[in-house]
Image (spheres, grey):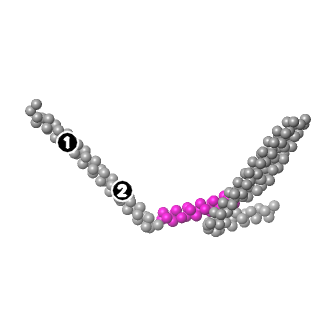
């Protein structure tokens, strides 16, 4: 048992020392495929359980038959889960490796001096656009007020 635990620990820690790449992504795809196969096995186990339960209702010792069917189902599911647990552990490790690598890449891109310069240029351009927009709105308000004043003057100037 100790040997299995230490072996499992080695398999979990070993991938953390290397960078993620196509091998890890291929392994994740393989794990997904194996999970699909295990899900299919679970579905078949559930189908067999339901079939046995249905057949049990024709027997005299119905309760004993139902208990036996459930016991067999639990054994099947236990074997499937025993395969799933290490697979899920490995999947978690691989996903963490890929996530860490993506985060490091994002951080590297965020701290890139060229990108930083471009961001500052974008901020300056945005602030200039804001100033221009405020100026246009001020000019438009001034024109409206001026047009209203001229309209009132024209009304006073008409002889009628």
Circle 1: element type: helix
Q: Position of residue 11 (x, y in %)?
A: 72, 65
- 146 versus 28 height, above or below: above
Name the residue beneath numbered marker 1.
Answer: 147
At 25% from the left and 46% from the top, the residue drawn is 140
Q: Position of residue 7 (x, y in %)?
A: 76, 65
Residue extending farthest to the right is 60
Q: Nearer the viewer, residue 54 or 21?
A: 54
> What stretch of residues is rendered in magenta?
89-111
Residue extending farthest to the left is 159
Q: Position of residue 61 (x, y in %)?
A: 90, 36
Q: Nearer the viewer, residue 50 or 111?
A: 50
Give yes or no for residue 38 being in the magenta stretch. Answer: no
At 25% from the left and 44% from the top, the residue drawn is 141
Q: Earlier in the sequence, mark 1 or mark 2?
A: 2
At 62% from the left and 66% from the top, the residue drawn is 22
> Of tags 1 and 2, which is closer to the observer?
1
Distance from Cα at disc 1 to Cα at disc 2: 31 Å
Q: Quadrant of the C terminus?
A: top left
Main SS category, magenta section: helix
Name the residue beneath numbered marker 2.
Answer: 126
Give yes or no for residue 100 being in the magenta stretch. Answer: yes
């Amino acid at each position: 048992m100790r040997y299995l635990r230490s072996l499992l620990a080695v398999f979990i820690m070993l991938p953390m020392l290397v960078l993620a790449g196509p091998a890890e992504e291929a392994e994740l795809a393989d794990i997904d495929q194996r999970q699909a196969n295990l899900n299919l096995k679970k579905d078949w186990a559930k189908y067999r359980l339901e079939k046995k339960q249905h057949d049990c209702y024709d027997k005299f010792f119905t309760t004993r038959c139902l208990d036996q069917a459930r016991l067999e189902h639990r054994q099947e599911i236990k074997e499937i889960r025993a395969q799933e647990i290490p697979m899920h552990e490995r999947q978690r490790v691989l996903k963490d490796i890929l996530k860490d690598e993506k985060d490091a890449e994002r951080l590297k891109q965020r701290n890139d001096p060229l990108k930083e310069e471009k961001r500052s240029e974008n901020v300056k351009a945005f602030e200039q656009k804001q100033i221009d927009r405020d100026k246009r709105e001020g000019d438009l308000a001034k024109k409206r007020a001026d047009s209203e004043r001229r309209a009132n003057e024209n009304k006073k100037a008409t002889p009628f």
